Amino acid sequence: MQVRSNEYPKEAARVIREEPQVRESVTGATLSFDAKRRAAYAEVDSEQWRHFAEGVKNHVLMNLEHYLEQAEAALKRNGVQVHWAEDAEEAQRIVATLVRERGVKRVVKAKSMLSEELGINPLLESLGVSVLETDLGEYIIQLLEQPPSHIVGPAIHLGLEQIRRLFHERFGTPLDAAPDALAAAARKLLRQGFLEAEMGISGANFMVAETGTIALIENEGNIRLSTSAPRLHVALVGIEKLLPRFSDLAVFLSLTARAATGQRLGTFVSLIQGPRRSSEPDGPEEVHVVFVDNGRSSVLADEEAWETLRCVRCGACLNACPVYRQTGGHAYGYVYSGPIGAVLSPGLVGLENTKPLPYASSLCGACYEACPVKIPIPKLLLTWRHRAVEEGLTPRFEKAAIQGYALAMTRPWAYRLAAKALRLLPEKALDNTVVPVLKAWVEGRAGLKPSPRSFRELWEEGI
Amino acid sequence: MRVALFVTCLADQFFAEAGVAAVKLLRHLGVEVDFPPAQTCCGQPAYNAGYWSEARQMAEHTLGVFEDADYVVLPSGSCTTMLRAFYPELYRDNPRMFARASSLSGKSYELAEFIVRVLGITRLGQGLAGQRIAYHHGCHALRELGLKDEPIALLRSAGAEIVDWPAATECCGFGGLFSVKLPEVSLGMADRKLSTLPEIDVLTSADGGCLLHLSGRIHNRGLPLCVKPLAAVLWEAAQNRRTQDA
C-alpha cells in the first residue's frame, strides 16, 4: 500500500481542525475499549499472563526458523498447501496465480491487517475479481473506499449518523434505523456473498507450529463463513504469528480478547486444521497458507527493534493512547497506526518513509501498560528518534538548537546569562514572539512568563 | 539529614515559588537543604528528542554536580525519572559511567516521594482543610517511578478532598518537544483532560512541564481554574491554618 507517513503532522492537524467528529468517535470508543480491557485484566493475574505471553513469543522469535519448518510440515500433513512470500509482490503473485488457475470471480474476505499491508484488495480488483469485506466495520469502510482506522475496529472513526446516512444512500434503510437494523441490511447482502464466492481470504491471529492450526478470533461469525463456505480458503500469515504448542492457545486467545475488547474470549474462535475431509459435510476443498515476511526478518535481525514482532495486533495500545484518540488511524499514513504502528512501520517500510511517526507520542507510557505481550513501545519510540538523529533525518535548525542548548547547560555561567536575558525581555514579549518554537507554544497556551526572580536569585538572597 | 535540591531548570525559571516552598518544607521537616549552584538542566528534552550525545553531555554535568550528595530531591517527577531511569539507560554501553549514573539514580527522589518513602512522613499538617484538589499524575512519575499514592496521601491527610477526576492519570499532552512538534494534538489532549474536571479549588501536580502546559491552556481559554505546583501546596499543607492566596 501507499505510505503517506511523512505527512503525519500535517494530517493530524487537519483531522483535528476539519473533522472534529473523528476525535469524538475515536475518543468515545477507545475509552470504552480501554476501560473494558482494564476490567478484564483485573479478573486474572494479568501481570503473570503477560509475562508468560512475552516469554512464549520471545522463544518463538529466537527460534523462528525451527518453528516455521515445524509449522510447514504440520500444515502439509494436514493437507494444506504452503507458500512463502518474501515481500508484498510475491504474496500478490501467489494470490493472483490461485485466482487465475482456479477461475475465481468472487472473493469474500475476513478482516486481515496483513491483507491491507499487502494490498490484496486493489490486486483482486485489478484482476477483475469482486471483493467483499465481510467484517461489518471493514465492509463499511470498503463502501467508503477508506483504509482501516484501527487494528480491531476499522470504522472506529465514524459516528452512527454517518453510517445511517451511508446505508440510507446505498440500501435505502431509514435515516433513523437502529444499529441492529443496519447490521441486518448488511447481513442480507453478505449472506449472498458467502454463497457465491469461490475463494475466502483470511489472516491468522495465531498459527500453531506443533499442529499446523490457524487460529482466528472474531465476534460476528463472518470469519467462520468466509473460511468455510467457499471451496478455496487462503490464509495470509505473517511469519511472526507462530506459537509453539497447541496448549499455548489457551492463554493467547483469552489474553488477546481481553486486551482488545475486554472480552474473556472472542464470540467465535475458529481453529482451522486443513481442508474438508471426506467424512465432513462442509468446509473448503483446498486450504492454502501464505507465510509472509515483507520486512519482518529485517526487524527480527534488528537488535534494538525485534521486540516489536511480539505484537498480537490487539489494538490495546491504540485504545490506551491519548495521541491516537485525537485523530484516529488515518493520519498516521500507514496501515498500522497508533503506538505500535509508530514503532512497527519504520521497521517494515524504512525510517526515511515514516520519520514523523516515532514523534507521534508524548511518551506517556500508557501503551506499554496496556500491551499484552509487554512490548516496550516508549523505549522503541526513543530508539527510532535516536536513529533519526544519527541518520541526519531531523531538521537542521533543531539539531543546532539542541547543540546550543547542551552547550549552555554544561556551562553554569551561560545558563545564568540565559536566565538573565529571559528576565530582560519586555512584558508580553513571549506572547508576540517570532521564534518558531515559542510561537507554536504561545499560540495555544497564553500567559507564558518567567517568575519575576529565578529560584537561584532568591536562594542567593537567602530563603 | 542533608539533601541536595535539584530545583530543575523549569522550576528555577518559571516556578521559583515551587523551589522556595520545597526548601521551606524540607527545613520544616528537619532536613538540611543544599543548593549546588552549578546545576542547570537534566537534559531530558534532548534525550526524548533522540539527541543522546547532547543528553550525555548534560547528564555528565549533572552527575558531577550531585556526586557528593547523600540524597538528591527534585520538585519534578519527570526530571527525577531522567536521573533515576534514563541516565543509566544512556550509559548502558559504558560501565564506568553506568556505575556513576546508577549511584545518582539510587539517591534521587521526587519531593513527595522523598517525604513519604525516605522520611516516613505521611501527615504534614492540616493546612488544606476543606480544599477540593485535582491531582494531575505526571506520566513519568506515575509509570516510571510508580508514584501514585504518596502525593495523594500527603494531600488527603492535610484535609484536602481529592476530587474524582476521570482523566487524572491521562497524559496532559505536554511531552516536552511533543507540545511544539504536534501543537494541535498536544492542545487537543489538554482540552480533553480539562473537559473532564469536576469543580475544584486547586489543580496541582508534581510536574512543572505539565503545569506550564495546562495553566497556559487554561489561561488561553479563560477558564477560572487555580493551578499550583505540588511543592507549594504541600508547604501550605504543613501550615495548620488555611492560607487565602488563591
Image (cartoon, coloured by chain):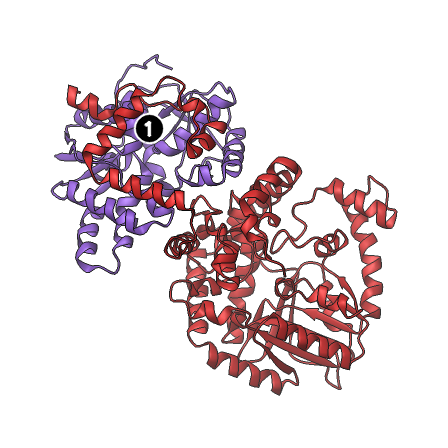
Residue that protrudes farthest toward the right in the picture: A172
Screen quadrant of the N terminus of chain A: bottom right
Q: How many numbered marks, from 0 up? A: 1
- Where in the figure is residue A137, as x and y percent of width and height? 71, 53
Q: Quadrant of the C terminus of chain A?
A: top left
Q: Secondary structure at mark 1?
A: helix
Residue B26 appears in view: yes
What residue do we see at 71% from left, 64% from top? A121
Residue B46 falls left or right of residue A175: left
Query: Which percent across, then down, holds residue A273?
Result: 64, 78
What tint does the image give chain A? red
Q: Residues within 10 Å of mark 1 (few under 14, many from 20)?
A: many
The numbered mark 1 sits on a residue in which chain? B
Which residue is depicted at the point 46% across and 40% down?
B181
Q: Is A383 placed above or below A205 here?
A: above
The spot of residue A237 in percent (x, y) is: 60, 71
Q: Would residue A436 appear left or right of B96 to someone viewing this image?
A: right
Identify which residue, A61 or B37, lies in the foreground. B37
In the rendered image of the structure, the colour used to display chain B is purple
* Residue A223 falls in image quadrant: bottom right
Which of A163 and A219 lies nearest the eye of the viewer?
A163
With A116 as the anchor, is A54 left or right in this view?
Answer: left
Tell me: A430 left or right of A208: left
Q: Position of residue A287 (x, y in %)?
A: 69, 79
Residue B117: tell me if it is visible: no
* Foreground pick, B191 / B164: B191
Residue at the location (63% across, 84% down)? A78
Residue ID for mark 1: B230
Q: Is residue A257 above or below residue B28?
A: below
Amino acid tagged 1: Leu
Among the 4 quarters of the image, the one containing residue B72 = top left
